[in-house]
Structure formats: structure tokens, C-alpha cells
Image (cartoon, rainbow, N blue to C red):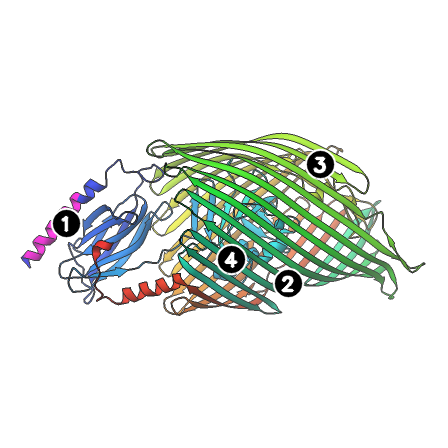
Amino acid sequence: MIQKILVTLLVSVLLSGAAFSQDKPNRKNPDGSDKKGKLTGIIVDGETGAPLESAAVQLFSQKDSTLVVGTATDKTGTFTLEPRFGRFYLKISYIGYNNTIVNNIKINPQTPEVNAGTLKLTAGNEMTTKVIEVEAEVNPFENQLDKKVYNVEKTIVSESGSAVDVLKNVPSVTVDADGNVSLRGSSNVKILINGRPSAMLGNDPSAVLEQIPSKMIESIEIMSNPSSKYDPEGTAGIINIVLKKQQDDGYNGSITVNAGTRDKYNTSVNLNLRKDKFNFYGNYNFRLFNMYGNGATNKQTIFNNTSFFNNQISTSHGKMQSHMGSLGMDYMPDKKNLFSLSGSYSSRDRNRYDLGTYVNFDALYNPTSMYFRNSDDDESGNGVDINLSHKYKFDKKKEELNTAFQYSRSSEDESGNINQYYNTGSSYLQQKDNTTYSLDIFSGQSDFYNPLGEDNKSKFESGVKGVYRSINSDYTSNYFDFITQSWFYNNLTSNNFRYKDQVYSAYANYGNTYKNFGFQLGLRLEQTFTKSEQLTSAQNFEHNYFSWFPSVYLTQSITKTNEIQLSYTRRINRPNLHVLNPFTDYSDPQNLRKGNPDLKPEYINSFELSYMKYFTTLNVSGSVFYRRVDDVINRFVTQLDSATTLMTFENMNNSQSYGLEFVVTGSLAKWWNLNASTSYYYTKVSGSSSIGSTLDNSSNVWSGKLMTSLTFPDLFDVQFGYNYSGKMITATGSMDPMQTLDIAIKKDFFFKRLSFTLRVSDALNTQKFSVHTNQSDIIADMVRRRDSRNVFFSVSYRFGTEMQQQERKRKRQENTNEDMNGEDY
């Protein structure tokens, strides 16, 4: 007994000396800071549960197995280590017990404090080692300098859904009834896929987002104030959808099959093969969805001091069938070079049938006319993305040059048949429409990153980029003449519009840190050439302009778990095809629409102050932002007669937006994870347009999201996702509150090879969109609903080298008598 105590004391002394020598002040974190984390745990006897005093605890670097810090347990068996950030493994030694290794310990700014829990030592020979493989948990939230990263791999409430379902659960993001995405209350947001723009998102991004299965998504990156490195387009910022790309050695893959109520199905396959210097990967997704909806509008218009009324009731049925696939390869001939080539292809066919009933009333609410409107739209589209890139790593650590080229194309062919007839059954309008649309994007860029100084505390990055876009939209319309019983080309509505732009840019960023203070300054310069052509009316419009976009980031660490950040960026929102085309859109005969080719781009100045607090198991962040938009593009509605309105677009003086956000992520217990957020946005638009129109309106809304996961070991996982959007006060009226609740249960089998998931979307069937308009000449109430409550059942199967390795690790962990050489760790 005395011998055991003496040996233990000797080991403790050696550990203290080793820790002192290894943890010197000049050893910095990768970012150059001196911040430390904390690792705690309790060592007990595996049979009796009694605490083990003076057990030797050593923490080694996962990278090179050097000893980082060490200590001995106190009389309660507790130990505390304070290493700097990094990845480690823990070794516990005690005479008369098997050595124990705990792998995959990660301490970083997002998880500065890690509790290893209660570790049970088994009696035996100290030359025998028991290995505990800790599965590396992906942090659900990461706060980086210029973006927030939400890792969504374990979001099972959207597991059988699409990218739209994933985005609904991300803080700061809202999705409306048509799948349109907004960031911090603004729909002018730039959406990227794997950090690149895609032509497939050009004309109808919601349709393409519906094609991307949630199983393919690894994370969502929110950049509300992107640095000068990124394209400055988009009022609210950037949403980057990062797709999974398997990198493990050997072969790996997964198959997922989903089925939902009212004929909703999708299937996805992912494959990966990594061998030597090559990595091959690919995926395929098939989706077949039927969607149903209904709506109603009651409108009062005031024309020449007289009121007129109109009621509309509509029902719809939509069907979408899509295919999406990608193939790619990486080739690494040596440690300095990485070549990548990838391609994606998507195709979709959509059909939508709408039946509308329109009733017009006079001032005394006597019906004056009633007609029905049937529309049957068929759309087929396809898209392709081809990416070629090269990464070169210099001799200096982290210094690299990235070069990339991309070609992206999207095309659509949409045909529509419209039949309007009176309640007597006689038709008075038959119309056939056809629209062909195409978008081509060519881009090339080169980015250089260079860490400066011996300690890499400062950095310099720069780059150049060129983008060429070409958009064509050709709309033809034919109407049926009941007198001649013939079809005629409608030259009043048919039009062909073409838009081209070229954007050339260069940027530079410099960042540095001093003690706990850090900063990054950047500037991006852009030259833009645009040309719009209305080929039908032989009108040409050209606009060329030079823009500059600075960015500033200031960070201050108050303590190792408290941080504040102040940022400023300037951005741009260029007018798109739909607001530029000067031809009048008659697709809705009572709500006409006309673009303005002379619109100027909007310029946005955005400020944000944020605070981060890291607790042991929770991260809390709060943000306050202010956004000013100059030359803001706003819509104007003019009453043409008692039943018809015309919507146009004009540049106003400015708009100002304010907002608050509060986000909590982490775990309340080992079996209980939490992701909660609440936000408030306020926008005010004021000024006059070039045609003399004036506007002075404001809007505000607050919302909240809660996603919580409960894990019952060896049983199942349960997840609840709740979204609430409060009453929105808009410039022309208001929108009623809306709430949804999604529930999912997941069960794993065969070491997580096989998974079953049951999901209920909008379980309370409360999702509906109710909008109220109250203007001087228009008062309207509109409500729309979709078949949002559905039940989905999903089956997933994973296979390959990674799963085999995990099984072997588990078997080693269960076999505590297996002899291993501790020096291998």
C-alpha cells in the first residue's frame, strides 16, 4: 500500500513538471490568442464506484502525441485541466488498474469547457489499456468572424424534407407559403450552393430548393455582414448551403427512401470512394410530390369616390417530379496540390392546376358579374453546374492559392392554358401562353491567403473575379377569337426580353490580433456593365457603374468565454429581370404588372454589434443591427378602373431597418439539446421617386424558433421544431401571426447502419397566411393555405469502410481485456 502511494506521488510530481514545461506562455492557439479551455471529469473504481484519489491524468495532442498538460485527481476523484484550444486524447493511469484512453476530445471557442463525465477504471495490469472512443460531436452552432454556421446533420424534423424544410429551422431565416426565403425580414438575399452562385437558382429558386433533399445538406452558413472576400450582392446578406462531401478512406455510401401522405415520395443515394491520391463521390435524388392548396380574397376598391367589391376563391393542385444528381473527383498528386472537378445536373417537371371563382359587386353589394378562371400550367426545366478548381499550398503553413472556374446554366419551358367563362357556361376568354427562359453564368476567380508573422497572428488575403451572365425570357401568348373560331397571336402581351451583365472585381483583406483584441479591414472594387433589350419593341437600355465595398470587423474578448464584435459592410442589390422588363404582364387581368428598365441598383450600409457568451454546455449570442438602403426599389400600385390595378417599380430615397436577435444553442443535459432564437425587425421606407410619387411607410415583425432534441439511450431520439411569427405590420397593412409545430422520432439499429424516422410536419395544422391591406383606395383581406400537415416515414441505410471501422472501435471498447500498446496513442 505504501509502495502504491509513493509511486502515485512520484507520477504526480512528474506530471506537474511535464505540464509546466509543455504549457509555456509562448505556446499560442492557432489564432494567436492565449485563451484557455477547461477539461473536467471524475475517476472512479469500475466495480465499487468509489472515487480514486491521485490517479494520473495526462492530456496529449491528437496531432503529434506531445504531452500538453497533466494533473492528479483529488480525494473525490475529480480532475481539472486548462489546456489551450485544440484536439486531444486523455490518458488515465493508476496502479492496479488498466490504463484508460479517451479519444476525440475537442476544445475550441464554441466548446471551451468539456466535461468528460465519470470514467470507470477496471482492475487489472496497468500495462493493459482500455480505449474509450468518443464519437466526435459536431457542434450545432459555430460563430465565426464573418458568418454563423448551423450544422444541420442531426435535424431530424426536416430529415425527410428538402432544403426549404431545413431553412425553416435556421435562426434569422423565414420561408413563406411559396417557398420564398428571407433573411432578417428581407427577401433580397443571395443564396449560394457550396460557396458558389448557381444558375439553377436563377428564375425560380424555391423550386430548386425543393429538389435538394435535406439528407444531402451538411450545414447552413448565414452571412448577414459578409466580408469583402464575398460577392456584395443581396440586401440582407448571403445564405450558403453546404452539401455533404464524404472524405473518409475506402468506400462509403447511404440510401434513403421517404414516403409521405397524399402521394409524396423521394429517394436519395450517396456514394464515395477514396483511395490513395483520388477521391470520387456522387449522389442522386428522385422526388415526386403532390401539393394541394386553397385561398380566398375579399377586396374593396374606391374609384371616383365610389366603392366596388370583388371576391375571389381558388383551389389548386400541383405535382412536381424531379431528378438531381452530381459527380465529382479530387486528385492530390502531392501534399501541395489539389485538383477538383465536379458536375451537377437537375431536371424537373411541374404541373399546376388552379380553379378560381371571381364575383364583382357594385357599391350596394349587388353582384354585377361572375366568372370562373381555370389555368393549367406545365413546366419543364433543367440545370447544370460544372466546377473546376485548384488549390496550391505553399511551404508556409496555411498559405495557399485557390483558383476556380464555373459554368452554370438553367433553362425552363413553361406552357399555360387559361379558360375564363361566365357562370352561364359560355367562355369569353381562352388563352395559351408559353415562356422559354434561360440563364447562363461564366465565372473565374483566384484567391490568395497568407498568414503573416512567425506566430500567424495576422493575415492578408486578396483575390480577383470575373462574372458574365446572360438571361433570356421569351413570352408568347395566343388567344381564341370566338367570332372566327380561330387562334391569334397576341402582340399586345407577347414579348422577348434579354438581359446581360459583366462584373469584374478585386478585393483585399488584412487582419491582426493584439492580446484579446482583433480586427479585419477589407475593400472590394467592382466595375459593372449591364445591357437590357426589349426585342419585341426594339428598346435598348445600358447602365455601367463603378462601386466600392469596404468591410470592417472588430472583436474584443472580455474573458475566455465572453466576446463582443462590431462589423460594418457595404453591399448592393441589382434590379432583376422581373422588375426591369417594361412590358405589361396581363396574366392576371385584374392585377397588371409592369417593370422599369431605368431602375438603379440599391446600395446598403449595414452595421452589426454582437455578443457571445460560452457556458459549459450552452452558447448564448445576441445581435443588434442597423441597415440603410439608398435608392431603395419599391412597388407602386395604381388603380386603373373599378376592378383593375397596375403595379410598377420606382427607386425611392431610402429605407432603414433595425433588428434584434437572441440565440441559444447547446445542451441542458447529455440527453437534451436545445436551439432557440427570437428576433425583431423594423423597416421604414421614405422619400420620393423620379416620377414624383411619395412614400412614408414602416413595417415590423417579431418571431421565435425553438428546436429541441431528446435522446433516450438505446431507445430512440425525439425532436420538436416550433416556429412562431408574430403579427407583421407592413407598409400597406398587416399579416396575421402564424405558427407551426413539427415532430420527429428516430430509431437506429445495427450500430447506426439502419435508421427509421417518423416525422409529422405542421402537426397542429396551423400554418396559413392571412394578409390585410388597408390603403386609401384599396381594402383587402387575403388568406392562403397549403396541405402543410403531412406524415412522412423514412428509412436510411449506411454502408462502407467508415461503418466497418466504427463497428471495430465499438468491439474494441467492449472488450476490456484486449491487450494494446499504450505507446501507439
Residue under circle 3? 531
Where in the figure is residue 647, as x and y percent of width and height?
75, 44
Q: Tell me which segment is drawn in magenta.
A: 3-17
Residue that appears at 61% across and 56% down: 346
Q: Quadrant of the N terminus?
A: bottom left
Residue under circle 1? 12
Q: Is residue 9 magenta?
A: yes
Q: Nearer the viewer, residue 224 or 522?
A: 522
Residue under circle 2? 321
Of badges 1 and 4, nearer the viewer stands: 4
Where 454 falls versus 408 (above or below)? above
Tell me which amino acid carries mark 3: Lys
Q: Which mark is residue 282?
A: 4
* Mark 4 neighbour class, 10 Å CA radius: few under 14, some 14 to 19, many 20 or more: many
Q: Can residue 590 be seen in this view?
A: no
Of badges 3 and 4, nearer the viewer stands: 4
Among the 4 quarters of the image, the one containing residue 96? bottom left
Among the 4 quarters of the image, the one containing residue 821? bottom left
Give the farthest residue toward the front: 333
| CA separation in Å, label 1 and label 4 | 52 Å
- Helix, strand or loop for the magenta stretch, by majority: helix
Where in the figure is residue 268, as x and y percent of width and height?
53, 63
Tell me which amino acid carries mark 2: Gln
